């Protein structure tokens, strides 16, 4: 009986199977899984301090989410990255290896990472100074996209190397804008730019994982918040983009308008006008509430581990890398944190050569897992909590009622 081993065995939490000639599926034996692991490239970072642009891109695994010119997917065995895997599910290309009912179920969960920016023309769209700063402290650029650049341990040298790899050299010139701000404001309204773009008025604080806003039309999701355009783009880049965006990014959903040179100058002047400074209200960290009822693991698994966390913190039964939060990735070393099972949660994270167990707490008594979920709320707009990495990494915060559920389960002793 001939077996065909799939190339796309990367979905988290899915037992690896093979398609049998003539139809049907059978599990791969443990020995086969071990053999596949041995043929899979180790994904955890191997160079603590990248020395070249290419080493920096490989260390921080830009190709885990992006198509990177000159680099294949993160694993030598896999033909997909996170985004193209989601696209394959949506297009039905997973039906060859997995049962159709399973693929249909996965489709219902895919709201994020369905497309990532093309990095091939990055040097024509952003300034070097902005990119180097943003890589070290990423904030949300596209509010409705949902997924964001993960917060990684990118230092100044690392950021410069990454900018070198993507040939981002543009600097801001001293040339002033020649356009008329009010004429640009009128053009912005006339062409309904606000139907896709925010300009400093995005509902960032209210967006949570699974929010219905993330199902908005594609152009609205892809459009950046224009409050950042002055920092991100030089005047020359903005002029080129407004003149012919598809010359720079062929698959952009930004229409090509027939702007005259004067209209381009007027729009550029308006978009680069500094927005009024609004006094920022003091941030108060949400205090999780302990539920009065008893919470059991299946409810926690349904809300968190089986649906979301296992994409980065998979159990050891999954072939391949088991996710960057387990065996390493995105520039982080492996922490052996398995959030796909109750046993993995109880074992906790490995630090300094030993597992901490659940609950591993901060000095103020907050369970570390809960602290990570809370920290993600502030990271969207660039507020980082020292010593705590917000989770889920690179995705919107989970709803506060789900944090309450997890907090209560931990405080109740993690009942089965």
Image: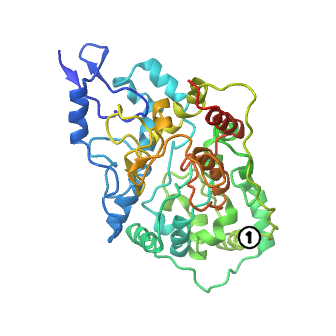
Instruction: Indicate whether 99 appears above or below 108.
Output: above
Q: Residue at label 1?
A: 270
All told, the count of numbered labels is 1
> Which quadrant: the C terminus?
top right
Along the line of sight, which residue is nearer the eye, 308 or 186? 308
Could you tell me which residue is drawn at 34 percent across and 59 percent down? 58
Out of 384 and 169, give the one closest to the viewer: 384
Q: Quadrant of residue 242?
A: bottom right
Tell me where residue 137 sits by quadrant: bottom right
Question: Residue 155's x, y, as percent?
Answer: 47, 70
What kind of element bears circle 1? helix
The colour scheme applied to this rendered structure is rainbow
Which residue is depicted at the point 53% across and 72% down? 127
- Residue 84 vs residue 373: left or right? left
Q: State the residue lying farthest toward the left.
A: 1
Q: Is residue 347 visible?
A: yes
Residue 341 in view (yes/no): no
Residue at image position (41%, 43%) is: 323
Looking at the rendered image, the quarter that the N terminus falls into is top left
């Amino acid at each position: 009986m001939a077996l065909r081993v799939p190339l796309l065995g990367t979905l988290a939490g899915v037992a690896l199977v093979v398609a049998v000639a003539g139809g049907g599926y059978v599990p791969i034996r443990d020995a086969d899984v071990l053999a596949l692991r041995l043929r899979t490239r180790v994904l955890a970072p191997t160079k603590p301090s990248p020395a070249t642009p290419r080493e920096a891109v490989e260390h921080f695994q830009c190709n885990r989410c992006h198509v990177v010119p000159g680099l294949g997917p993160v694993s030598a065995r896999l033909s997909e990255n996170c985004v193209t895997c989601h696209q394959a599910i949506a297009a039905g290309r997973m039906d060859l290896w997995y049962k159709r009912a399973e693929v249909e179920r996965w489709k219902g969960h895919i709201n994020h990472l369905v497309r990532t920016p093309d990095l091939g023309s990055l040097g024509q769209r952003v300034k070097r100074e902005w990119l180097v700063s943003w890589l070290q402290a990423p904030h949300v650029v596209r509010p409705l996209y949902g997924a964001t650049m993960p917060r990684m341990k990118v230092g100044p040298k690392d950021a410069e190397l990454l900018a070198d790899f993507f040939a981002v050299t543009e600097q801001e010139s001293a040339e002033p804008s020649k356009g008329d701000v009010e004429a640009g404001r009128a053009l912005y309204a006339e062409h309904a730019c606000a139907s896709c773009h925010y300009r400093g008025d995005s509902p960032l604080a209210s967006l949570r994982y699974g929010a219905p806003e993330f199902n908005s039309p594609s152009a609205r999701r892809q459009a950046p918040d224009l409050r950042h355009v002055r920092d991100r783009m030089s005047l020359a880049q903005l002029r080129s983009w407004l003149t012919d965006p598809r010359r720079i990014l062929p698959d952009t959903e930004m229409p090509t308008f027939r702007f005259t040179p004067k209209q381009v100058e007027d729009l550029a002047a308006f978009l680069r006008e500094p927005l009024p400074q609004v006094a920022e209200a003091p941030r108060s960290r949400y205090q999780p509430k302990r539920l009065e009822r008893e919470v059991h693991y299946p409810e926690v698994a349904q809300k968190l581990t089986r649906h979301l966390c296992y994409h980065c913190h998979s159990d050891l039964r999954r072939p391949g890398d088991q996710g960057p939060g387990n065996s390493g990735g995105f520039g982080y070393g492996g922490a052996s944190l398995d959030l796909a099972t109750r046993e993995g949660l109880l074992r906790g994270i490995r630090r300094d050569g030993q597992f901490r167990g659940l609950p591993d707490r901060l000095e103020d008594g907050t369970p570390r897992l809960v602290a990570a979920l809370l920290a993600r709320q502030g990271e969207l707009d660039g507020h980082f909590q020292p010593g705590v990495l917000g989770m889920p990494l690179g995705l919107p915060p989970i709803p506060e009622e789900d944090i309450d559920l997890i907090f209560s389960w931990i405080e109740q002793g993690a009942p089965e």
